[in-house]
Amino acid sequence: MSRYAFHPEAFKDLNEIWEFIAENNIDAADAVIGDIFDAVRALVAFPNQGHRRPDLTARPLRFILVRDYLLAYAPDGSPLWVIAVLHGRRNPRLMAAILRGRE
């Protein structure tokens, strides 16, 4: 059994990221998604290594940056629950709205 899980919308995030990058370079798209999964697997052992973002949510979520993407996750869940994978340059208000929609 996996020690991490993705919110259904976070899976959509991953698919959109892969499709966007793959338009120009499939190998690069695979590498980015691979890096994201590697980071999530590393979080299982040390879930509190991420930082909080009170500007985005009052929930006890943590965030890490993988390449240009911000991963939002619940560190206290078992399995570790990935809420969203967002481009780090998105407007913070939009990111906050996305997170609110993924309760």
Image (spheres, rainbow, N blue to C red):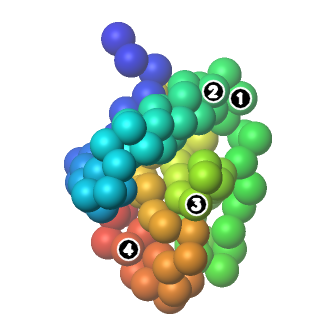
Q: Which residue is mark 4?
A: 98
Amino acid type at circle 2 is Ala
Q: Nearer the viewer, residue 39 or 54?
A: 39
Q: Secondary structure at mark 4?
A: helix
The numbered dot on residue 42 is 2
- Residue drawn at point x = 35 percent, y = 49 percent: 25
Amino acid type at circle 4 is Ile
Report if the CB atoms under discs 1 and 2 are less than 8 Å apart: yes
Report if the CB atoms under discs 4 and 2 are less than 8 Å apart: no
Q: Nearer the viewer, mark 1 or mark 2?
A: 2
Quarter of the figure that contains the C terminus: bottom left
The numbered dot on residue 68 is 3
What is the C-alpha distance between the residues marked 1 and 2?
7 Å
Q: From the top left corner, tell me how far across and down residue 27 is, in percent.
A: 38, 38
Q: Which residue is mark 1?
A: 46
Q: Indicate whether 43 appears above or below 84.
A: above
The numbered dot on residue 58 is none
Of all residues, the one furthest to the front in this rendering is: 24
Tell me which numbered mark, 1 or 4, is placed earlier along the sequence: 1
Tell me which numbered mark, 3 or 2, is placed earlier along the sequence: 2
Q: Is residue 46 visible?
A: yes
What is the C-alpha distance between the residues marked 3 and 1?
21 Å
Q: Nearer the viewer, mark 3 or mark 2?
A: 3
